[in-house]
Amino acid sequence: VAKHGGGRTATVCDNNLILMHQRRTRIAETLTDALNSGEGLSLAYQPVFRTDRRLHGLEALVRIKGGEQEGLPTSEVISVAEERGLILPLGRWVIKTVCAQMRVWKTEYNCVPLVAVNVSPIEFMQPGFATQVVDTIRSAGVDPNRVVLELTESTIMSNLLDTRDQIAELHGSGITIAVDDFGTGYSGLSYLHELDLDALKIDRSFVDRMCISQRSALVVRAIIEMAQALDIRCIAEGVETEDQFSLLRNMGCGLFQGYLFGRPVAANEIAPLLQPDN
Ligand code: C2E
Ligand code: MG
Ligand code: MG
Ligand code: MG
């Protein structure tokens, strides 16, 4: 393809593009097989803790299980699913699997933790998305009050009118909404007072830097204060050190997620954290 000066660079570049395309195609094939067979995917659950280090809830995170693609970054898996038209079936698999797991916890431990599920903008844009999620949760016999949907700012803003209706329908059934990666997306804040939201999740990039950058610390403080003023929950993502934990706690943050408290783990490793009053 590349013939003129600098052709060598162009060829390397083309090769990289081809390799990347092939890599994404293999991921798409794995996903398709997994969704068809019901095998090859799993969910990891990461705990969210309260200030007293008791469990507040969990976030479900999808993983490729087995095969040479095990351990692939989930962000890449999700972006392939979105690009190759697989995100809708994947999203349905995630919510169904979460519900089945919640039933197991209820039966075996008489305790159903709050579980947060990530929603892609493509899923949320589907007409009838809210109805479908509510149906799935209800027919699984799960209490919708125990389910949280995580939406990013750009998902929320992509069609504000529609968002308002979908959120109203979700709330009507008891499902709550958290804003994921707060502070990194759409910069407007108007949606915060227009929509009924239940939690803000402070993006990891702010938490990462808050102990070394005064400016990052100030941003974190502002987010916590805004959540308090709006009377909604605030969850710090990516808490890795005791210093971050104590600074966040001093600023009034009440909920924490990160490697300091626990990595995402298989469902059976969550059992010891479950307490009947959760
Ligand atoms: P997210 O929703 O912001 O999830 C948090 C990510 O941060 C997870 O990455 C988690 O493993 C990671 N994390 C948690 N604590 C720490 C920490 O202390 N340090 C560091 N360095 N990382 C931490 P993961 O599981 O790789 O997921 C990446 C993203 O993929 C998620 O970001 C979410 O946007 C998306 N995702 C995951 N599962 C699903 C899903 O089922 N559906 C959709 N649509 N997206 C999903
Ligand atoms: Mg999330
Ligand atoms: Mg997040
Ligand atoms: Mg994030």
Image (tube, rainbow, N blue to C red):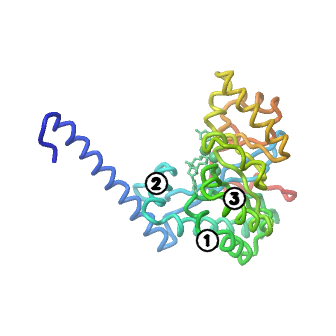
> Where the C terminus falls, by quadrant?
bottom right
Q: Determine which of the numbered discs, if any, sits on residue 238 in the image.
A: none
Secondary structure under badge 3?
A: strand
Q: Amino acid at mark 2?
A: Glu
- The answer to whether the residue bearing label 2 lies less than 8 angstroms from the nearest atom of ligand 1 is no
Q: Amino acid at mark 3?
A: Leu
List the residue tagged with mark 3. Answer: 149
At horizontal 83% and vertical 34% (from top left) the residue drawn is: 252
Q: Determine which of the numbered discs, if any, sits on residue 127 in the image.
A: 1
Residue 94: x percent and y percent? 60, 65
Secondary structure under badge 2?
A: loop
Residue 38: x percent and y percent? 52, 72
| Marks 2 and 3, how far apart at CA | 26 Å
Q: Is residue 156 above or below residue 112?
A: above
Residue 148: x percent and y percent? 73, 58
Task: Name the residue furthest right.
Answer: 277
